[in-house]
Amino acid sequence: MAHHFAIGIDLGGTTVKTALVDTNGNIFSQVKLPTLADQNPEAVIGQIKKSIDEILLISKGKSISGVGIAVPGLVENPGGILKNPANFKGWDIIALGDELEKMFGMKTVVDNDANVAALAEAKFGSGKDHPDFLFVIWGTGVGGGIILDGNIYRGPHGGAGEIGHISIDHKGLKCNCGTIGCVEAYIGQKYLSNRTIEKLQVNSDSKIVELVGGDLSKIEPIFISKAAEAGDQLAKEILVEAGTLLGVMLGGVMNTLDFRVTIIGGGVSAVGDFVYDAVRASTVAHVQKPLKSGIKILRAQLGNDAGMLGAAGMVL
Amino acid sequence: MAHHFAIGIDLGGTTVKTALVDTNGNIFSQVKLPTLADQNPEAVIGQIKKSIDEILLISKGKSISGVGIAVPGLVENPGGILKNPANFKGWDIIALGDELEKMFGMKTVVDNDANVAALAEAKFGSGKDHPDFLFVIWGTGVGGGIILDGNIYRGPHGGAGEIGHISIDHKGLKCNCGTIGCVEAYIGQKYLSNRTIEKLQVNSDSKIVELVGGDLSKIEPIFISKAAEAGDQLAKEILVEAGTLLGVMLGGVMNTLDFRVTIIGGGVSAVGDFVYDAVRASTVAHVQKPLKSGIKILRAQLGNDAGMLGAAGMVL
């Protein structure tokens, strides 16, 4: 096979990150521009166009298979229609894929950022040896993507993988989405920080307080994780509890799909290995017998590059 | 297309039911034999062989596409390998599909009874207009099958659709399977009957007691349903609660797969429409916004013929 390249774009609320990527997932050149999401759709599309132009200029003579774009929000295909991305001013429903395809005459594929990050791990990261896995984004919220036989499973309407809003307690906490007991309402970054603050108000004897210089509003999972790794009991308890609750949900998804593998990315995924151990133990406890011995809970490998790499991966 | 036929076999623990089925799901002739599961695998395979022989005799001159078999227990394909079906004496691991294919020189497909019943609904029943749905068997236990784009989704290891053991309460009831909070531990027929008995021991003012002639050990969902339809408050509460809990699980599965449709079969599925209303309301409450308006909870149409029809459907 000839050495092929693709342009991978990670369209975030703040920054558009664009890269020239080869079939092995190597990044050759990279362009970062502000998204201008607070202006209007024309401004945003202008920034995307400018990014592609710059990459094309640098990559003269190289064979480029097309453009992939990871976007925040719901996407409908064909057409690469992006609907109401959060915090994109004036953006209603725009066929971003079609528009760019006309502009550059190159195959253009648009998908939701969680799906794209999942594909990145499948092609270039922790999922390389696993044709079927659930990708979990554990960050501010809890999202996900499903990789089925090496490809993104989008579902009949393009919205598959919304695993953050699976209820793990039908009489539990109320989630921001309105549902009772969503796993996001237990382990999403904000909820996790809030519950830590609550616990510290009862018992403030924890290294976490020291790590945030006494300002509890600064608590984030990374500080809880650092405190835990320094031996802090409260911090350990909080994260092990979160991992255990994540495993309750994962067990249900593994049972449903007959999957064995979960890959965890997102901001919170940087927590220590002991949290992964808790996730694994809980998942094993919540799957049926034939699945138990095969359960794997892996850490995502690609970090902030996942969007660009997976986006390029869609057209490579 | 020529008018084709297939042989559909429903291998139960007690009876082998075999039918000649056409492409429209019409049953032409039918044979019922005892399974002889309490003897040995040779006896069981002998009964299957005898059933096929009888059907072939009746159907002389008809073009038969092959044999499909619905079996209880885990199946591995290719080969149609049936592993340790419950209550089949001496049956360890047998490549039932391969064996019959050699015997009759006809294409033979074997699959788990839940998957086969799901396919029957997809081809000939409530799922005809729905390419993607979850099929739930609500009976002694709670099982399921996933229909993806009109076909059975088996998962990488053939065990997909184990939705009865999704936890809906991580600190809830212990299920027979060992996991905490499985939906089966709340709504499976046995659990449902047991909880009804517990409630009646506290307050026996219910039509259910009358319907079972005072013998609480005879309580089954059909009596609870009858009592509810006659206006009995306790019976209504029990079934609406069960339907609501089923919807918690369904919401999670719909979110994960981006599905809108669930079809309910199995012994308990004969309950009144008000239970379906409760399942629907709860499912809608537990899915993300874009899914809410599309949620459909349907009753299976094919009853006891689902096994034979779906089995034939696998080779038609």
Image: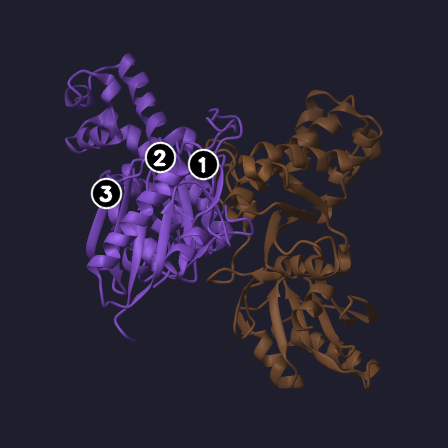
Chain colours: A brown, B purple
Identify whether B175 is placed above or below A8.
Answer: above
Q: Quadrant of the C terminus of chain A?
A: bottom right
Question: Label 2 to label 3, Cα distance in Å?
Answer: 37 Å
> In the image, residue B56 lies at what x, y percent?
26, 58
B176 horizontally vs B26: left or right: right
Residue at the spot 28% in from the left edge and 36% down from the top edge: B268
Residue A181 in sight in this render: yes
Q: Secondary structure at mark 2?
A: loop
> In the image, residue B255 lies at what x, y percent?
49, 50
Local packing at callout 1 (Cα closer than 10 Å; few below 14, some 14-19, many 20+) is: some
> In the image, residue A253 lies at what x, y percent?
54, 44
Local packing at callout 3 (Cα closer than 10 Å; few below 14, some 14-19, many 20+) is: some
Q: Disc 3 marks which residue?
A: B273
- On residue B238, which mark appears? none
Q: Earlier in the sequence, mark 2 or mark 3?
A: 2
Q: Secondary structure at mark 1?
A: loop
Local packing at callout 2 (Cα closer than 10 Å; few below 14, some 14-19, many 20+) is: many
Q: Disc 1 marks which residue?
A: B91
Residue A220 in sight in this render: no
Kindly check if marks 1 and 2 are in contact, taking CB atoms under 8 A apart as contact: yes
Q: Secondary structure at mark 3?
A: helix
Label 2: chain letter: B
Q: Disc 2 marks which residue?
A: B37
